[in-house]
Image (spheres, rainbow, N blue to C red):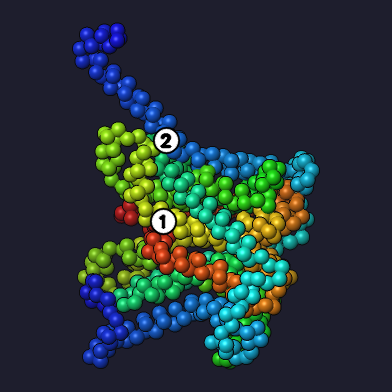
Amino acid sequence: MVEGKEIYLGLDDIRLDRPKQAFYLLVTYAVLIAGAIVFLMPLFWLITTALKENSEVYVFPPTFIPETFRWQNFPDGWNYEGMDFTRWAQNTVFITTVFTTGAVLASSFCAYGFARIKFPGRDLWFMMVLASIMLPGAVTLIPLYIMYSRIGWLGTFYPLTVPVFFGGGAFNIFLLRQFFTTIPMELEEAAVLDGANRFRIFWQIMLPLSKPALATVAVFSFQGVWNDFYGPLIFLTDPKTYTLALGINFFRGLYNTQIPLMMAMSFLMVIPTLIAFFFAQRLMIRGVVMSGLKA
Amino acid sequence: MAVEATLSSTGTKPEKSFFDRLMGTKRRRDTIEGYIFILPVVLGLLIFTIGPMLASFYISFTKYPILRSPEWIGLRNYVNMFTKEPNFWQACKVTLLYAVTAVPLGIAGAFMLALLLNQRVKGMSFFRTSFYIPTIVPAVASAVLWGWLLNPDYGLINAMLKTVGLPTSRFLGEPDSALASLVLMSLWSVGGGMVIYLAGLQGIPETFYEAAKIDGANGRQLFRFITVPLMTPTLFFGLVMGLIGAFQYFTEAFILTQGGPLFSTYFYSLMVYERAFRFTQMGMGTAMAWFLLVVVLTLTLLVFRSSPLWVFYETEVK
């Protein structure tokens, strides 16, 4: 195929005197570009539909660029009668902030114990943490629902925020434990000689050294809770407490002919995750990779 | 003071016992501190996982319309579930069908994309981002969007099929095509698996390929005897996680089809949700959840058991 190890070829390497290489490059780029178009088209369609006049979405053949850009769709959707997107956005931001904070704090705290301290029972508990990743949520959900209803938590944000402080998520613990074990032990030993205790070592040495891993956990937690539909669906019973995910579904259920407005609201919900992605792209991909390769 | 005096008078011994004592306390301190650090997750497992699991196991043997207290009825929920529940087997069929199509297709798609991205050409980070972005779109937004793309009359996909002269489809609107449409939707987010496989591919040492080339291997042989075997552990992980996810598939079906038309997308999780939260039959709901757990565990175990047949681990050098 391609000779040389670290050579990356571009379109400028297509030369007539090397027909085999030219053919390889043309085919590769053709497939890549076709693939990228297929994968990005739905998102493009989301944006372009969000900016169309309601009547324009029903024309054939469909228009790829709106005849007139109707930016008004965004405020119109946001303030639609009977909808309360401002409140739902506030709820979502609140839940997301508390959840993400809890996930980072709790998972790093627990991961330190698993990574750095040797004690009887540690490996057993760690195995249980890992096993819980595979457990179908349905098994625990119903008793939790009953428990929350008994203590008056249904319709509040507690079921969506409090549990994360108890461990911060098995997957996050796993990810951070892997990261902590790569930090040289000498750094800690020096601090012990200086008389620092474990909690200070954790807070003042481990956490500052682990910023990229913590950021990965934060971004994943943010995405997970921002996108969550099942949890809010079951625990948030009052439309006043809805999150954006529930709100958009509510909107769709009532006014499913308002296509551009629906797309506009969906697009608004995508924006923060897109920003988070571009902000932390490398961290995220590395996190996904770590979870997959070291399991 | 007195003890110390007597110990020091016996020569080397006191130092050793002092050392032992120090180690003893260090071990004890480690144990205490260790448990303080993992206490949150220990409590979390007890309160939010193990406790509820035991509770749901008990509830599955009761009749429990949430407002009254549970009433023991033995195995009746399980018996009714298998024999009387009208759509139970349909739900199993739908879920299984989805799992055996969406998971292998997803793995194959992700693996092919990874191979494509592993080519040494410029601009890869742009393409990688393009393929990965769909995986970060919230399920609700993606369901709303795909509901519109797949709209039988005004959707983009039918419009394109019409333009190039291919037959159109009713997609989610017809029992024959609804489940396949959900599988198609799921393939939009193969990017998550793709980046994992891509990293796996890039982790294969270049020397393996070079050595094989010296032995006269051609491109197909390199792929068949080096790339594929070395990728099997990663593909295995993808298979296990994919199956577990597929058996719990819920959001898109709940938003777009509610199990219809004619129960053609009546996923197992939709059935559990209806039983437990629409009809508040907690006993039946937990029984169904436990059956799902048993099925998922059995399948995972089978996949793990089958792994020596096809998964290659580097430690097993022959």
To the question of a shared chain for discs 2 and 1, the answer is: no
Disc 2: which residue: B34
Left or right, B281 with reference to A160: right
Name which residue lies at 66% across and 57% down.
A241
The quadrant holding residue B114 is bottom left
Disc 1: which residue: A215
Q: Marks 2/1: CA distance?
A: 24 Å
Subunit of label 1: A
| Quadrant (top left, top right, bottom left, bottom right) of the N terminus of chain B | top left
Q: Where is residue A180 in the image (x, y as percent from the top left)?
A: 36, 47
Residue A290 showing in the rendered view = yes
Left or right, B288 with reference to B43: right
Q: Between residues A68 and B72, which one lies in front from this camera angle?
A: A68
Q: What amino acid is found at the position of numbered circle 2 in the picture?
A: Gly
Name which residue lies at 47% across and 61% down.
B238
Q: Position of residue A144 (x, y in %)?
A: 65, 46
